[in-house]
Structures are given as C-alpha cells and as structure tokens.
Image: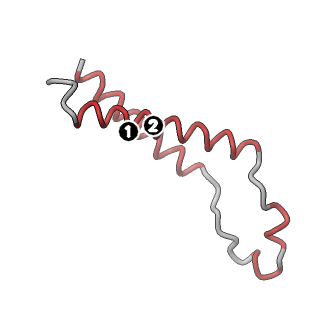
Amino acid sequence: MAYVVVGLQILSGIALAVLILLHAAKGEGLGGIGGSASLFSGPSQAETGLNRITWVAAGFFMFTSALIGWRIIQF
C-alpha cells in the first residue's frame, strides 16, 4: 500500500510540474511599454481550466505528502 501512495505522489509531482510549466507568463514584458498588453487582461477559458486542474493536482500532491509525512502509510 505504501509503495502505491509513493508512486502516486511521484506521478502527481511530475504532473504538477508539467501543469505549472504550461501556464502562460503573467508579466507584460515589452508589450507593457505601448499599452497593448492591457487589452487582454482577463484570463481565457483555457487558462481558467488549467488553473483548476493545477489546483486539484497540487491538492492531491499535498494529500499524499501528508499521508506519508504523518506516517499513516507504513512501510
């Protein structure tokens, strides 16, 4: 049982890293000089969905970390 939880934690950690890297950059960069970066200030629907999936993955990773950390899962 413990190895299954550790395996799920490893997989969720990899998924979380990939999901975080998929997010768009929040900085305006050089587009902020001309003021054109503020035209599209709201998040797109895809970005909102990606945020939700990332939060779920982060919650699952924290849950498995707590299980292992509190020694609920014994090796």
Which residue: 38% across, 38% down? 62
Q: Amino acid at mark 1?
A: Met
- What residue lies at 21% left-to-right and 24% top-to-bottom? 73
Instruction: Reply above or below: 27 against 49.
Output: below
Q: How many marks?
A: 2
Label 1 secondary element: helix
Residue 25 appears left or right of 1: right
Category of crowding for the residue at label 1, using alpha-carbon neighbours closer than 10 angstroms: few (below 14), some (14–19), many (at least 20): some
Q: Is residue 26 left or right of residue 12?
A: right
Badge number at residue 48? none
Rounded to the nearest whole Å, what is the CA distance between mark 2 and mark 1?
5 Å
Residue 23: x and y, percent?
61, 51
Q: Residue furthest top?
A: 1
Label 1 near label 2: C-beta < 8 Å?
Answer: yes
Q: Which residue is mark 1?
A: 62
Nearer the observer, 49 or 59: 59
Residue 13's quadrant in the figure? top left
Q: Which residue is mark 2?
A: 59
SS of the residue under disc 2: helix
Residue 57 position, x and y percent, is 49, 36
